[in-house]
Amino acid sequence: RSPVNDQTTKIIENTQALPHTEVCLENIDIIAASYEPLLENIDDPFQLSALYREAEKHNLPHPHLTISCLRWANIVVPVDNHLFTFKRDHK
């Protein structure tokens, strides 16, 4: 499984406001693009804690708030008992 790629790293570096609640949904495509590569390193469906750990491992900003934004936007969605999946057709 590959680590987060250079493109994702550049997205994160170029995103100053990742995320604040008031701009969360405005930047949801950037946020989703930043988090989707993390899924290569965890099982699907996954526990939110696994996604959080991956985000922390890759020094992504504000992982708890970011994952909440992904949930509010119905990109990270529940599938079973405390398990979630990432809707790749969110656009």
Image (cartoon, rainbow, N blue to C red):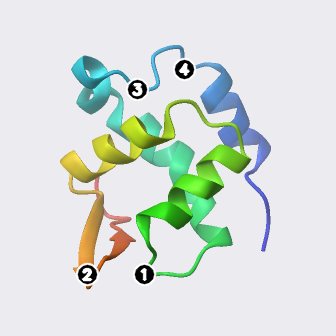
Q: CA distance from mark 1 to mark 2?
A: 7 Å
Quarter-of-image position of residue 56: top right
Q: Quadrant of residue 68?
A: top left
Q: Which residue is mark 1?
A: 45
Q: Residue at x 37, y 73 (%)?
A: 85
Q: Position of residue 39 (x, y in %)?
A: 57, 66
Amino acid type, residue under disc 1 in the picture? Pro
- In space, the residues marked 4 and 2 are separated at their CA atoms by 30 Å
Which residue position is annotated with label 3?
A: 19
Q: Residue at x 45, y 35 (%)?
A: 30
Q: Give whichever of 65, 29 is nearer the camera.
A: 65
At x 52%, y 60%, the residue is 51
- Secondary structure state at the residue bearing disc 1: loop
Image vertical order of residue 27 relative to residue 7, above or below? above
Between 56 and 72, the residue placed more toward the observer is 56
Tag 4 or tag 1, which sits nearer the N-term? 4
Determine contact: label 3, label 1, CB under 8 Å.
no
Q: What's the mark number on residue 15?
A: 4
Residue 61, position as x, y percentages in the image: 57, 30
Asked if residue 91 is positioned above or below residue 9 in the image, the reply reads: below
Of marks 4 and 2, which one's residue comes earlier in the chain?
4
| C-alpha gap between disc 3 and disc 1 | 24 Å
Work out how far the residue at label 3 is from the one at label 4, CA to CA, in angstroms. 9 Å
Amino acid type, callout 3: Pro
| Camera-nearest label, 4 or 2 | 2
Marks 3 and 2 sit apart, C-alpha to C-alpha, by: 25 Å
Label pair 1/2, CB-CB below 8 angstroms: yes
Query: Relative to residue 30, is residue 70 drawn left or right?
Result: left
Residue for badge 2:
79
Given the image, on which type of amino acid does mark 4 rest? Answer: Thr
